[in-house]
Amino acid sequence: MERKKNTLRFNWFVAVLLVITVYFSYTFIEQQIHLNALNRDYEAAQARLEAARLRNAELKEQRAGLEDPTYIEKVAREDLGMTRQGEMPYISARR
């Protein structure tokens, strides 16, 4: 009776399977990192878009006010320091 050698043989199937598993794991992790970066960029863009929409609404409100004579008078008095004829302007010392 012949004895079989109890030596460890290199199993190519297991080696190839291990290499394929490592490759797909690496690819999956790289894609997840890239997708997470894209998601952060998307969320930042959404926040900027919302801020721009709010600013747009404010500007539309301001533009609508420019057609109102009382708003025009208020802006002229407060920002430009204008007065009506015969009025005395009041200048605060706190400026």
Image (cartoon, grey):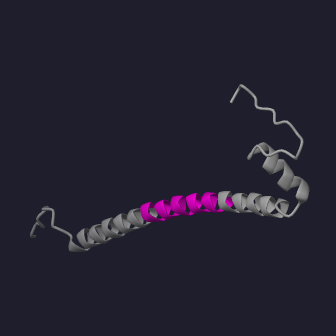
**Residue at screen point 49% across, 60% down:** 36
Q: Is 34 above or below relative to 78? A: below
User: Which quadrant is home to the C terminus?
Assistant: top right
Q: Nearer the viewer, residue 2 or 41?
A: 41
Q: Which residue appears farthest toward the top when viewing the image?
A: 93
Q: Is residue 46 magenta?
A: yes
Q: Is 9 above or below relative to 40? A: below
User: Which quadrant is home to the N terminus?
Assistant: bottom left
Location of residue 31 (image quadrant) = bottom left
Q: Nearer the viewer, residue 24 or 52?
A: 52
Q: Which residue appears farthest toward the front when viewing the image?
A: 86
Q: Position of residue 3 (x, y in %)?
A: 10, 66
**Residue at screen point 37% across, 68% down:** 27
Q: Give the total number of marks visible in the rendering.
A: 0
Q: Is residue 74 left or right of residue 54?
A: right
Q: Main secondary structure of the magenta part?
A: helix
Q: Position of residue 24 (x, y in %)?
A: 36, 70
Q: Position of residue 74 (x, y in %)?
A: 84, 48
**Residue at screen point 24% across, 69% down:** 15
Q: Nearer the viewer, residue 21 or 95?
A: 95
Identify the magenta region.
33-50
Q: Is residue 76 magenta?
A: no
Q: Nearer the viewer, residue 54 or 44?
A: 54
Q: Position of residue 69 (x, y in %)?
A: 89, 58
